[in-house]
């Protein structure tokens, strides 16, 4: 990902990743990073903010969109191959207000997503408001 490249590959973080919670309404979208020794939390936050501003302005490249769709499709295939994972997936989404029809049309809807769709949705959910949270160990 862009954030991984800017943080980990440049030695600013020892770990970085992002995830989202699938819900009917606004859910959680999180980006987490552990600064490398000697790198301040502020430096990491600045890099993440810069990458996010650029992404919100430009949207994903075609390669990024294809890679994301392929990753989602592969995950969906593996989920369907495991009955426990499939039951958990249906249970989570039904509990969050999704319908069976919507769950079953997941792959089709993902294939139809465009770069403009991603940019529009990302700006809607992440463009105006966000929260920065920093967890630090207790001082000794």
Image (cartoon, grey):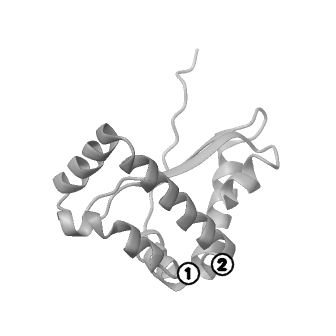
Q: Which of 71 and 26 is in front in this view?
A: 71
Q: In this view, does 68 lie above or below 55?
A: above
Q: Which part of the image, by quadrant, shows the N terminus?
A: bottom right
Kind of element beneath mark 2 = helix
Q: In this view, does 18 lie above or below 34?
A: below
Left or right of 59 in this view: 29: left
Identify the residue under disc 2.
62
Q: Which of 52 and 4 is in front in this view?
A: 4
One can see residue 119 in this view: yes
Q: Which part of the image, by quadrant, shows the C terminus?
A: top right
Q: Distance between the residues labelled 2 and 1?
A: 7 Å
Which residue does the image show at 49% across and 60% down from the upper left? Answer: 72
Q: In this view, does 32 lie above or below 124?
A: above
Q: Quadrant of residue 25?
A: bottom left
The reply to whether callout 2 and callout 1 are in contact (CB within 8 Å) is: yes
Kind of element beneath mark 1 = helix
Left or right of 85 in this view: 68: right
Judge the density around disc 2: few (<14), some (14-19), many (≥20) Cα neighbours within 10 Å.
few
**What x and y, as percent, mark residue 88?**
27, 43
As drawn, the residue found furthest toward the bottom would be 116
Identify the residue under disc 1.
115
């Amino acid at each position: 990902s862009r954030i991984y490249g800017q943080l980990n590959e440049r030695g600013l973080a020892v770990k970085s990743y992002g995830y989202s919670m699938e819900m009917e309404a606004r859910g959680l979208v999180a980006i987490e990073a552990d600064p490398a020794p000697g790198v301040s939390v502020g430096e990491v936050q600045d890099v993440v903010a810069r990458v996010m501003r650029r992404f919100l302005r430009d949207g994903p490249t075609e390669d990024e969109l294809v890679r994301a769709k392929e990753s989602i499709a592969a995950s969906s295939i593996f989920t369907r191959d495991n009955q426990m994972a499939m039951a958990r997936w249906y249970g989570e989404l039904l509990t969050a207000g999704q319908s069976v029809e919507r769950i079953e049309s997941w792959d089709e809807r993902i294939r139809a997503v465009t770069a403009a769709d991603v940019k529009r949705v990302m700006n809607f959910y992440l463009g105006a408001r966000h929260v920065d949270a920093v967890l630090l160990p207790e001082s000794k």
